[in-house]
Every structure is written in structure tokens, then in C-alpha cells.
Image (tube, rainbow, N blue to C red):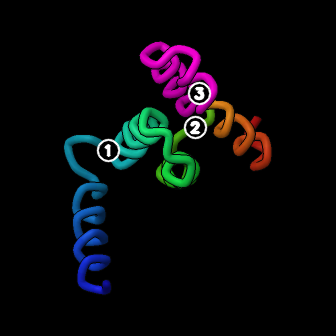
Amino acid sequence: MPDTLKAVRGLTGMCYREGVISVKMKRLMSLALALGAGCTNCVLGQVTLALEAGATTEEILETLSVVVSMRGTTGMAESLRIIQLLEEMGKL
């Protein structure tokens, strides 16, 4: 489905370009949404993309705290994947 993939990539490219909201903030917002959705691949991808956009480990951890405040223990459980990834990357 190359046409569908092309359309999705076009939308993604448009949404994640620098604007009134920085790319870094968009990636942190997307990380929070991915955690809420429970999408493991999305979560891991957004952590990597947030770091590439200049997010610090502290900003990522603070994003996790917001997710935990909204989702409670399920947010905490989902956040553990990110803690593990940051440890593997030598960021913690």
C-alpha cells in the first residue's frame, strides 16, 4: 500500500515540523499519548525521536510523571519500558 504509506508519512512530516510548538515538545506530547495508548513501538520510537529533537532525560522523566499522574499505576507500568530503554542507552 505505497500510496497509503506516502500519505501517512506526508502527514507525519507536516505535523512534526518546527512551528509555534517546537519539535521537541511535539515529541514529548506524542510520548505521553503513546504511553496512554499502550503502544510499545510508539513509545520507544517517540523516546528516540524526542532525544534526537533535543529532549533531555529529565524532560522525558518529567513527561512520564505527568502520564503517571493521569493514569496512575498503569501509567507507571508503561513508563518502566522507557526507564529500561534510557538505562540501555546509558542516559540513566
Q: Which mark is residue 61?
A: 3
Q: In the rendered structure, which segment of residues is drawn in magenta?
A: 59-78
Q: Which mark is residue 56?
A: 2
Q: How much space separates mark 2 and mark 3, taking CA atoms?
A: 9 Å
Q: Residue 55: where, in percent of width, then height?
A: 52, 41
The residue shown at (67%, 39%) is 81
**Contact between labelled residues 3 and 2, with CB atoms less than 8 Å apart:** no
The one nearer the camera, 72 or 6, is 72
- On the picture, is 78 further left or further right than 19? right
Q: Amino acid type of disc 3?
A: Leu
Name the quarter where the C terminus is drawn: top right
Q: Amino acid type of disc 1?
A: Ser
Label 2 crowd (10 A; few <14 / some 14-19 / many >=20)? some
**Label 1: which secondary element:** loop
- On the picture, is 3 further left or further right than 24? left
Label 1 crowd (10 A; few <14 / some 14-19 / many >=20)? few
Residue 61 colored in magenta in the image: yes
Q: Tell me which label, 1 or 2, sits earlier in the chain.
A: 1
The residue shown at (52%, 18%) is 68
Q: Residue 85: where, in percent of width, then height?
A: 71, 45
Q: How much space separates mark 1 and mark 3, taking CA atoms?
A: 18 Å
Q: Tell me which label, 1 or 3, sits earlier in the chain.
A: 1
Q: Residue 12: where, in percent of width, then height?
A: 29, 62
**Label 3: which secondary element:** helix
Q: Residue 39: where, in percent of width, then height?
A: 49, 46
The residue shown at (39%, 42%) is 30
The one nearer the camera, 40 or 88, is 40
On the image, numbered disc 1 is attached to which residue? Answer: 22
